Structures are given as C-alpha cells and as structure tokens.
Amino acid sequence: MAVVAGAAALGARSARSHVITFDGVTKRYADGTVAVNDLHLEIPTGEITVLVGPSGCGKTTSLRMVNRMIDASEGKILLDGVDVQTIDPPTLRRGIGYVIQQAGLFPHRKIVDNVATVPYLLGWDKRKARTRAMELLERVGLDAGLAERYPFQLSGGQQQRVGVARALAADPPVLLMDEPFSAVDPVVRADLQDELIRLQNELNKTIVFVTHDIDEAVKLGDRVAVLRVGGTLAQVDDPETMLARPADDFVREFLGGDRGIRRLSFVPADLPLRGDLTVPIDAEVSEAAGAAASSAVSWLAVVDGEGRPRGWVSTEGLPPAGKVADLRLLPYGTFEVNGGSLRSALDAALLAPSGCAIAVDADGKVAGVATREELARATAKVAADGAAQPAPAEQAAQSEQAVPAEGAGRG
Amino acid sequence: MNWLIEFFTDPANWSGSSGIPVRLLEHLEFSAAALLLSVLIAVPLGLWVGHTGKGALFVVVSANAARALPTLGLLVLIVLLMGVGTTLPVLIPLVALAVPPILVNTYEGIRGVEHDLRDAAYGMGLRGGQVLLRVLVPVALPLILLGVRVAAIQVVATATVAAYVGLGGLGRYIIDGLATKDFPSTIGGAVLVALLALAVQLMFTLLGRMVVSPGVRPAVRERLKAG
C-alpha cells in the first residue's frame, strides 16, 4: 500500500508538492547556545539539497529538525505544507527515509530484515516486506547473497549501501542523509556518491544531504546551502552559480581554491571538433606528412583499426618512409563528446603534448579533436559569462583563474 | 578420594528424605525460586534505568552496597527476626545476592548500546518501547544473560546456607557432615554443589545459543571474521 502511495507521490511531485520549508527556524538549547538561527530555506521536490558548512554551523541540527529527532525552538518546518510539529514523531519518521554516518544497522538482524525495518513497522506482511528488501538490495548494488548475513560481516561501504536501502524501503518521498559517506575511505566514498547520483536519476527523491565536505556538496547537490557557524544561512544556490559568484568572503573561503577550474565541471564540453587531425595507425608516414601539411598542423592523433585513440605523433622531422605504427606515440587524453564537461576536455588537453583533446563517443571511438584554440575560446567564454554578473570583486578572481587556460591556448 | 567413593556408593544416600535426589531437588527449588524472583526484580528495573537513564546512580551505588552484604549474616539476622519454618528467610539473602549482578549487567548492557543504533532506531520511526524491546534488548542480551548466569552460579553455590537454619538442600551434607565429623558427607556435598554449578553454567551457554542472535554473539563474530 505504501508503494502505491509512493507512486502517487511520484506523480504529484511534478507539481512540486513535496517541499520542505524552513520558516524562521531557530534552535536554542537550555544553556543558551544557538545551533540554528532564524533559518529560512525552501527544499524543492525531487532534488538533492546539500547543507554544508564548518562544524558548529547547525547543519545536522537543521536536518534532524525535519524528522523531529530534535524539535525547533522557534519557527516552523513545513513538510508538504504541514507543520511537522503537529505530526506524531514516529509516524512522521516512518514516512521519511533517514541515513546516518555509521549506517546504524541493527547488528542482531540479518541484512534483509534490516532493510525491511520500516515496512515491518508499517505492518506489511513479512513476505512482501522481504521481497521489497531484496529488490532494494539489488537497487543499491549489493549482491543478493548478502541478504542472509549479519551487519558485522559487511564492509563499511556495503553497510552504508544497506543503510541507504533501508531508508528507501517504504518508498518515502523525502530522504534525510546525515554525513552518510564521511566514515568510509575516499575510493569507496566516490563510489557511493556515484551510486547516489545514479539512484537519484531513477528515483527523483527529495533529498536533504548534510556534509562538511564542499567537494561532496558540489558533486551531489542540485542546490547547495552554505551555513556559517552560529547557524545562519550564508548562501543557497546551484553549485555552478555558487562557484562563479560566492555571496561573500565566508562562502568564497569555504569553497576553497581552484574555484574557477572546478566550475568548468558544470559547463558542457560543447566544442567544435575537427575530423581532419587524425591518422590511421596502419597508414604510411608519407600520408601522415601529407595530412599534416594540408591541415597546417604539427600534431596528429593516431587511431587504431577499431577507431580507438592510440596517441599523438609529431609531424615535425618525420622519417622519409615507414609506417605510422613505427613512430613514437605520445601520451593523450580523451573526453566524452556527449555529456563530458569542459573541465574533462581541458584535462584531456593538459595530458597531451599537443595541447589538444581527443573527443570519444560512449564506445571509446574517436569522434574528433578539440584544438587548443577552441578550448581557449570556450574557457574564455565561461570566464566572460561569470564576469558579466554584477559581482565586482568576483570578476577579478574569475578572470585570474581563467588566465592559465588562455595562456595554454596562445602557447 | 575414598571418602567420595564411600559417599556416593552408600545406598542410604540415594533414597529417603535425606537422599541425594531429594536434597538436590530441594536445593534446586530454593535456587530457582531465588533466581526467578531476582530476575523479576532486576531485569525490568535494569531495562527501565538503562533506557531512561533515570536513577542510574542510585542503582549502581545500591547494587555495589548489596554486594558487600554478608549472606550468612543476613540469613541469621532474618531468621532471628522471622523465625524458622518457611523458606522465605533463605530466599531473601539469596535474592539480595543475585539482584546486583543481574541489575548492573542489564543496566550496563542497555546503556552500552551504541548511540548511533538508538539514533537509527528512533529515526526509522520505532517508538520508545519498540526501541527497547526490538533493538536494545536483543543487542544487550549477551550481557544480560551473563549477569543472570553469574547470579545463578552464586545462588546455587550459596544456597547451601539454608542448611544452617534447618532447611534442606545439598548444604545439609556439608553442614551436618561437619557437625558430626562425617567427612565423606561433607566432601560429597561439596562435590555435588560444584557439579551443580557447572551444570548451571552449561545450561546458560546452551540458552545463549538459543536466544542470542548470531549477529551479536561474540564467539560467532570472532569465528566468522576469521573465516
């Protein structure tokens, strides 16, 4: 039944019904500490909103006020238009997915029963709850063989996946995630982040995600809310806008270095590609020399019989005869022609002595070459777009960041 | 050794109202009654204090004070106050002996459950009582059972004092044997009590296997981790 309700909610979501609203929310403790101070924030439906900030900024407190693990001192939190304060906490919580840092799996229960926790609480029959749990284990990328194990037999990353599956079990429209990936190692963390993005593409939940890691916030968030110590909101924006135009020094400092480069992650690599800068690996050296001369370039990308890139060759000082295959192949980088970011294209160019980036399709076949002139033009345009916005202090910083890319283009 | 053989092969010791079966039953009766009473007092109290955190200091201090009570002294005092004839004077000191380990272990077991686990349980939407019964108790069960086992062994070993005030049980062999310089009886009684304590230990080990989830059973965890 809850699945049906969830499906109905999915339909309603397009109308932006499930919104969490913080309306002047303050949390003051008995000793006078203010954890959250007059927070006004709208959490849109079907998006990941990341609350980020240094420790003591009240991000976890804000999150926990949504499912009433903590009650607000002042102000209101509306969930789908209803003041959460009017809902009995256990009832409220069963309708909201909750994922915490150490997963918090019940050690005495098998994995499958851990995942089925909320369905059991909602009174589903056991078989249905377990079937649903098995579905979710698969969905979060866990082997069905783990279902009958106990939590201590799983790695930290696996436990965290189970934690996510458990939160999703009753198909709640809203998911609260409290630093869920910060206790695992960086490689596993990156996997879990990718997995969350993939899941979110399928599920379109309204997710509130708390982290202290700005890179995680920028990677996952459709919107990022930066909070400052003392529990006030510093800025809320989509990550690209935030990187381009931080509201103040605090946000700028919190975003850290490389802001200009990181921003390029959000710009699609919409580059004109040249098809005449490649040469088949089984071609004669003389053909390569001819191609280079007609295009007036000194580098060619070598492509093998399957259309995959093999490397760059310099067309200066070519031997008079022989095969391209016998030439020294120099390192190269590639970016995906569909969906790749300008940052990945720039990175590909920086890996190659030619300074050009090889574009490949989803199968890894060469689609063309982006020249350094085109890369320079694209980065300069991003810098100009950023500078066009009314944030004078930012313009300087922004164009400074863009200079190395321009320099590379000229050189 | 000869005394032991003498004691266990004497047919008189295997029949009648002072035979081993009857004494053993009497002994088990006091012990079981005392243990049951202690569990009924200490487990709910320990769960409540551990779950709510209320009265924790009181529980720990009074449990430690109770441990310092001399059982025999208490027994004599109660008999002087109440007279002999019922089993109640024996039960009171045995309960006083058994409650502290059960109470402290139950309290510590519940209290010691990781904070994250409580947090997750409440966050999933379990109510207070469900958190206690479905999460905290199963996780704390090894520690709670350990408390009951320690109490049970102490009670079985200490129930011999019943004989001091004219009641039955295996203590009779020891006390009467000492009084009449019948050493085979004394030694035989002591061995029986020791065997009974071992049996109790074994029983609790088996009980643990039956009721504790493999996910929180320390031995299982070690074995599976190694494997």
Image (tube, coloured by chain):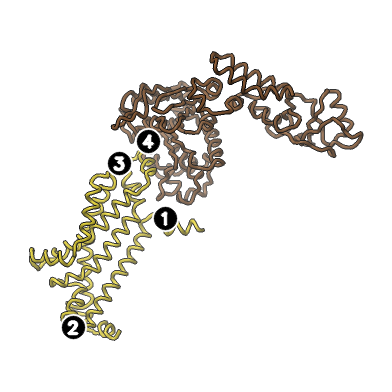
Chain colours: A brown, B yellow
**Residue that carries the numbered disc 2 in the rendered image:** B181
Q: Nearer the viewer, mark 4 or mark 3?
A: 3
**Residue that carries the numbered disc 3 in the rendered image:** B128
The quadrant where residue B73 appears: bottom left
**Residue that carries the numbered disc 4 in the rendered image:** A94
Q: Nearer the viewer, mark 1 or mark 2?
A: 2
The numbered mark 1 sits on a residue in which chain? B
For label 1, count other residues whose C-alpha is less than 10 Å away and answer few (under 14), some (14-19) or many (20+). many
* Amino acid type assigned to the residue bearing label 1 in the image: Pro
**Helix, strand or loop at disc 1?**
loop
The numbered mark 2 sits on a residue in which chain? B
Q: Are marks 4 and 2 on the same chain?
A: no
- N-terminal of the pair, mark 1 or mark 2, is 2
The quadrant where residue A96 appears: top left
The numbered mark 4 sits on a residue in which chain? A
Q: Residue at x 25, y 67 (%)?
A: B156
For label 3, count other residues whose C-alpha is less than 10 Å away and answer few (under 14), some (14-19) or many (20+). some
**Helix, strand or loop at disc 3?**
helix
A137 relative to B185, above or below: above
Q: Nearer the viewer, mark 3 or mark 2?
A: 2
B69 relative to A13, above or below: below
- Between A302 and B60, the one lying in front of the other is B60
For label 2, count other residues whose C-alpha is less than 10 Å away and answer few (under 14), some (14-19) or many (20+). few
**Helix, strand or loop at disc 2?**
loop
* Amino acid type assigned to the residue bearing label 3 in the image: Gly
Relative to B34, is A116 on the left or the right? right
Distance between the Cα atoms at labels 1 and 3? 25 Å
Q: Are marks 1 and 2 on the same chain?
A: yes
